[in-house]
Image (cartoon, coloured by chain):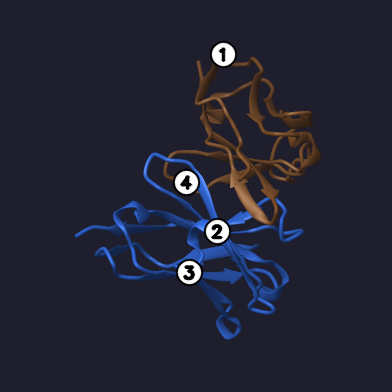
Chain colours: A blue, B brown
Amino acid sequence: QVQLVQSGAEVKKPGASVKVSCKASGYSFTAYYIHWVRQAPGQGLQWMGWINPNTGGTNYARKFQGRVTMTRDTSISTVYMELFRLRSDDTAVYYCASPATAVEGGFDFWGQGTLVTVSS
Amino acid sequence: SYDLTQPLSMSVSLGQTARITCGGNNIGSKNVHWYRQKPGQAPVLVIFSDNNRPSWIPERFSGSNSGNTATLTISRAQAGDEADYYCQLWDSSTGVFGGGTKLTVL
């Protein structure tokens, strides 16, 4: 079955960067786009962008452009989301998610989430 | 930017029908997806493309979308349906989520 397994929780200081991984299994890694969605404590969901695991092409939400990079390593079926110049309001659970159909479909599959805490 | 409006909270009696709305400008022209999220868990897709259920979702869940409102309908509400529900769509290649509705089953 399709699984997305994310790396563990992180604690970072303001101004630092964080890199979260998402390892895919149970399907052909290049078949589905991987998106990143975050959720601040007690808040709603916020889409950050996607990466095409086949080509490495990306599309970032305007809010994160210039501060986020999404990459992939096809040899280990893993995508990464790196967020730079962290602020306290970046404290959130970060999810990777994938639509099994079109790049702009519903998110059929989700990782378990990675809590990133930004605190001095 | 495109905005989606959901009621912050609503309640439904056990066994009754809950209708959760998602408002947006001409939302009926877009494909709307719905997610259920329980505390401490990742969201789960419950409806995709307005009115389609993934295989793991029971028939009690249905969706509709027309004009400026999309609706998620949960029939014969159960205690396990208590959760936050989010609508989502794509606008100019940007993912947009509604603010979420907390559903309480009484």
Q: Which mark is residue B85?
A: none
Q: Percent position (x, y) of residue B50?
A: 76, 38
Seen at 37% across and 65% down, the residue is A8
Seen at 66% across and 74% down, the residue is A29
Q: Nearer the viewer, residue A80 or B23?
A: B23
Quadrant position of the C terminus of chain A in the picture: bottom left
Query: Are dots 2 and 4 on a single chain?
Result: no
Q: Closer to the camera: disc 3 or disc 1?
A: 3
The disc labelled 2 sits on which kind of residue? Arg
Residue denoted by label 3: A66
- Which chain does the numbered disc 3 sit on? A
Q: Closer to the camera: disc 3 or disc 4?
A: 3
Mark 3, residues whose alpha carbon is within 10 Å: few (<14), some, or many (≥20)? few
Task: Say which quarter of the image contains residue A79.
Answer: bottom right
The disc labelled 4 sits on which kind of residue? Gln
Q: Closer to the camera: disc 1 or disc 2?
A: 2
Q: Percent position (x, y) of residue B7?
A: 55, 25
Seen at 74% across and 31% down, the residue is B62
- Which chain does the numbered disc 4 sit on? B
Seen at 56% across and 59% down, the residue is A61
Q: CA distance from mark 3 to mark 4?
A: 30 Å
Q: Nearer the viewer, residue A19 or B1?
A: B1
Residue denoted by label 1: B13
The disc labelled 1 sits on which kind of residue? Ser
B99 lies above or below B93: above
SS class of the residue under badge 3? loop
Q: Is residue B23 left or right of residue A94?
A: right
Residue denoted by label 4: B41
Residue lying farthest to the left in this orientation:
A120
Q: Is the C-beta separation of discs 3 and 1 under 8 Å? A: no
Task: Choose the circle earlier in sequence order: 1 or 4.
Answer: 1
Taking the image as drawn, is residue A2 in sight?
yes
